[in-house]
Image (cartoon, helix red, strand yellow):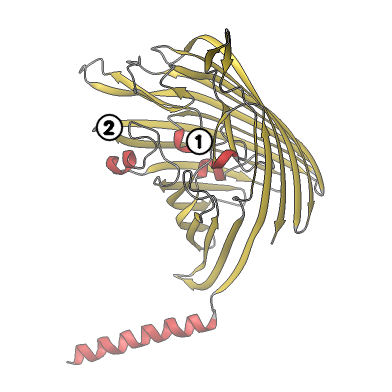
Amino acid sequence: MFLKKISLIFIYLFVSFLTISAAEQPTTHKLYGFVRNELYFNSRQNFDVLDGLFNIFPKPKDEYLLNGEFVDKNNVSNSQMLAISTRLGIDFTSSPIFGAKTSAKIECDFAGISSSYYLIRLRQAYMKLNWANTELLVGQTWHPMYANLQPITPALSVGTPFQPFNRSPQIRLNQKLNDNFTFLTAASYQMQYMTQGPLGASASYMKNGLLPSLHIGLDYKSKSIIAGVGVDGKSLKINNVRFNSGAAVAYAGYTHKKFQIRAKSVLGQNMSEYIMLGGYGLSVDATSSKADYTNFNTSTSWLSVAYGTKIQVGIYGGLSQNLGTNKNLMLTPNSVYGYGFYDASQLIIDQLYRVAPHICYSLPNFRLGFEYEFTTAKYGTIQSNGRVTNPYTVSNHRALATISYIF
């Protein structure tokens, strides 16, 4: 009985302490976001998402005979105006927990899922604990492969597919080593951005593999310079076969007054969850003669240069190169998975490059942007080593205008 009373007193005091602490520092919130409209024109059909707001790469030739001449079905222009990227978010701050400053974020837009546009879509939802030199984040936010550095573009795609683009549920720890260096480690799972495979884009490959994707990085930041390196790896289970992939990233940026220059390079395998070229394919294990999978290796780099604040001009360029597979592919129907490959024609992108100049006009609550984007893809018939034969090129000319009210 005595112990029961002591326990009740302890619980009462603990709850009272939490109540008093909460009363001393009530939860505060700040609303932010923008209303954004975009108008675009493409000179040919492209592989894209979000009804064309994310323009990834031009589709290959798809020719048929009409009146004695070959006509390319994909050589057709298109245009659209959309407001689905309009965004709304709330930042929260509250009482300290375990001696750490606490904050949280909920962010959404109206881009929906798949072809169900105009529906509310979760973008970010996380909480953070910040100590003097340590930050712990739990929830959905930008993957470290994207968050470390982004190009400067008015397009919503932010340089995709040359820039890794991914938001994932994750546990991330940032440990500040000194005034300039920060060590980062993160474990993330797939949800909205998923690996391609026999079931299409699905989170089941990682779920069945049981293990999260792991990322380790080292960042350097000073007044004018940002730089860093990182490694990323995942272990999937596809058709009951364990399959591993990895990637390495290096990036750097420099800012001086109104001038900015940024660059990033990624050497990766099976990067489809980042909306990047490449993937993997079916092969045969030379030792056991059992079915196995092999990665496509892809090298991707981009460079972004911009000058100005109120009126900004800039240019963005990206290059992606297919480096082939580690082992020979079987090349049976439905045996290669990833972006840039077309099973029916056995065509795959061997090289992709883009040049995109832009100009933007900005006020405190207003932004107007124009961008011209020239993207060329080199397609060829896939070979057993993952490279191509008989390559040819197709190009897309894209014009984009955006107008935003920011709050």
Task: Give the vertical position of 242 relative to 216 (above or below).
Answer: above
Q: Position of residue 252 (x, y in %)?
A: 64, 37
| Left-right relation of 22 to 39 | left
Q: Position of residue 61 (x, y in %)?
A: 55, 18
Most distant residue in the left direction:
1
Q: CA distance from mark 1 to mark 2?
A: 22 Å
| Left-right relation of 328 to 175 | left
The kind of residue on which mark 1 rests is Ile
Residue named by callout 1: 275
Tag shown at residue 242: 2
Task: Give the vertical position of 248 relative to 173 (above or below).
Answer: above
Which of the two labelled residues, at mark 1 and mark 2, occupies the earlier sequence position?
Answer: 2
Residue in the image at 60% along x and 44% along y: 220
Q: SS class of the residue under badge 1?
A: loop
Most distant residue in the front direction:
67
Tag shown at residue 124: none
